[in-house]
């Protein structure tokens, strides 16, 4: 018996443990739409939506949904950065490189400079790609050769470097590199015996777990790390406490657990308020505006488009001092408007995101599939979407 596209979608949805409401929220549609597609009451989705479904359901070949000719999903939704081979080689090197051992202070300055480039450049991947292999080598060498407290400080910087490598390799056609970066960052943080570094490593490790639909594993790593922190000390530990609760909120929203999601978000919001209206962590970017922007993500994941667009329209994205974070938040705002069929607003927000960071839009799977979908619209929406597609290298 040959399965229909709808039946295949239902089979993969149930295998992934997602409800119709959760799947609908993740692709910008309602639970009723998912039910109608699965039952065959609607025509099979067009290519952009099939690609989005495949991404969310972790399907690597579109033929698993359509039953037709093979089409690797990553070939459309994931654009590889040209410098990925050099970064991958540095990450996969098994021997400790030769060279000068840097002091922990010098290493910290170099890592901080790379993070500054990541946040301030409109082509952040290109900006850090030439630095990452060298800094990875230097951090690994210093963490191996230094002793005592200097070694622990170097290990913290090694973890920070792997976090940056994880961001660089995200949404590339090499998911194994993301896992490698997360795992090595956590190992370095644990070897440093630094609760603050372990908390940040947990935040980034949880991203990898969520992207692989391992929501419980993401929750566990965040909860374990939070137990190591003392938020009453304020400052960096308090900021990381709030960041970990944002991670918990994101996991709960992906699983459709709205009560748990908002309870965790409330803790993050109160934490950010305690730190101050204008507080922003220098490289994690945790602060009141970041928390507000993530509320849009939660509402959208929970398939509440009305609330999502209200929050999006009231968020001051310019207060986020990071081009890549602003671009990511604007993409989430576009996703919220797409859920309400607000295609004019969506294409406008995607255009704003592109001005903030071409690299973020070019490599973000949802942005690519949304632009591809909007290219088929008539009038100015389609015209603007086709211009975006040309800019980010999508052959529509």
Image (spheres, grey):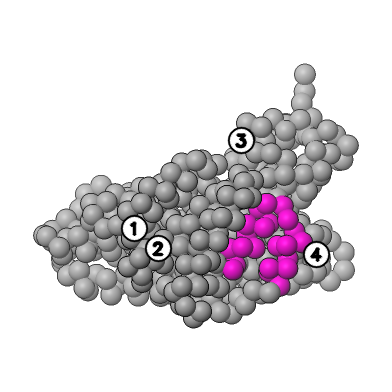
Q: CA distance from mark 3 to mark 1?
A: 33 Å
Q: Which residue is mark 2?
A: 240
- The single residue placed furthest to the top in the displayed view is 1
Which of the two labelled residues, at mark 3 and mark 1, occupies the earlier sequence position?
3
Q: Where are the magenta residues, as a range?
A: 292-313
Q: CA distance from mark 4 to mark 3?
A: 29 Å
Task: Residue 176: name its quadrant.
Answer: top left
Q: Secondary structure at mark 4?
A: loop
**Mark 3 or mark 1, which is nearer to you?**
1
Quadrant location of the C terminus in the rendered image? bottom right
Q: Residue at x 72, y 33 (%)?
A: 10
Q: CA distance from mark 3 to mark 2?
A: 30 Å
Q: Secondary structure at mark 3?
A: loop
Q: Is residue 294 on the magenta stretch? A: yes
Which of the two labelled residues, at mark 4 and mark 3, occupies the earlier sequence position?
3
Q: CA distance from mark 1 to mark 4?
A: 42 Å
Residue 368 in view, yes or no: no
In the image, residue 365 above or below residue 255: below
Residue 290 in view, yes or no: yes
Q: Which residue is mark 1?
A: 229
Residue 184 placement (x, y as % from top left): 32, 50
Q: Residue at x 64, y 50 (%)?
A: 258
**Mark 1 or mark 4, which is nearer to you?**
1
- In the rendered structure, are the residues bearing label 1 and label 4 in contact, judged by CB atoms less than 8 Å apart? no
Q: Which residue is mark 4?
A: 342
Task: Residue 292: name its quadrant.
Answer: bottom right
Q: CA distance from mark 1 to mark 2?
A: 8 Å
Residue 278 placement (x, y as % from top left): 49, 80
Q: CA distance from mark 4 to mark 2?
A: 35 Å
Q: Which residue is mark 3?
A: 16
In the image, residue 204 above or below residue 281: above
């Amino acid at each position: 018996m040959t399965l229909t596209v709808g039946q295949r979608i239902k089979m993969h949805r149930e295998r992934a443990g997602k409800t119709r409401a959760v799947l609908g929220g993740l692709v910008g549609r309602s639970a009723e739409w998912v039910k109608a597609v699965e039952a065959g009451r609607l025509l099979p989705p067009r290519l952009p939506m099939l690609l989005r479904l495949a991404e969310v359901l972790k399907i690597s070949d579109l033929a698993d949904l359509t039953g037709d000719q093979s089409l690797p999903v990553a070939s459309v939704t994931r654009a590889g950065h040209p410098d990925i081979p050099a970064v991958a080689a540095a990450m996969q090197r098994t021997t400790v490189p030769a060279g000068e051992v840097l002091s922990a202070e010098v290493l910290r300055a170099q890592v901080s400079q790379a993070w500054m480039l990541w946040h301030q450049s409109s082509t952040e991947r290109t900006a850090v790609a030439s630095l990452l292999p060298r800094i990875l080598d230097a951090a690994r060498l210093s963490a191996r050769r230094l002793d005592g407290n200097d070694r622990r400080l170097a290990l913290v910087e090694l973890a920070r470097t792997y976090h940056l490598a994880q961001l660089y390799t995200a949404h590339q056609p090499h998911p194994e590199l993301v896992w490698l970066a997360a795992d090595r960052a956590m190992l370095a943080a644990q070897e440093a015996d630094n609760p603050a570094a372990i908390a940040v490593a947990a935040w980034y490790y949880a991203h990898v777990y969520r992207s692989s639909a391992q929501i419980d594993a993401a929750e566990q790593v965040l909860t374990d790390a939070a137990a190591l922190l003392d938020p009453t000390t304020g400052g960096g530990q308090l900021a990381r406490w709030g960041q970990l609760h944002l991670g918990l909120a994101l996991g709960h929203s992906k699983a459709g657990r709205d009560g748990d999601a908002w309870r965790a978000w409330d803790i993050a919001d109160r934490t950010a308020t305690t730190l101050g209206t204008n507080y922003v962590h220098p490289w994690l970017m945790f602060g009141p505006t970041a928390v507000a922007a993530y509320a849009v993500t939660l509402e959208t994941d929970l398939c509440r488009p009305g609330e999502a667009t209200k929050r999006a329209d009231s968020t001051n994205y310019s207060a986020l001092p990071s081009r890549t974070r602003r671009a990511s938040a604007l993409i989430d705002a576009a996703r919220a408007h797409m859920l309400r069929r607000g295609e004019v607003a969506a294409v406008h927000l995607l255009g704003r995101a592109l001005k903030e960071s071409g690299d973020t839009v070019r490599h973000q799977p949802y942005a690519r599939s949304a632009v591809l979908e909007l290219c088929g619209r008539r009038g100015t929406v389609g015209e603007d979407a086709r211009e975006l597609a040309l800019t980010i290298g999508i052959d529509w």
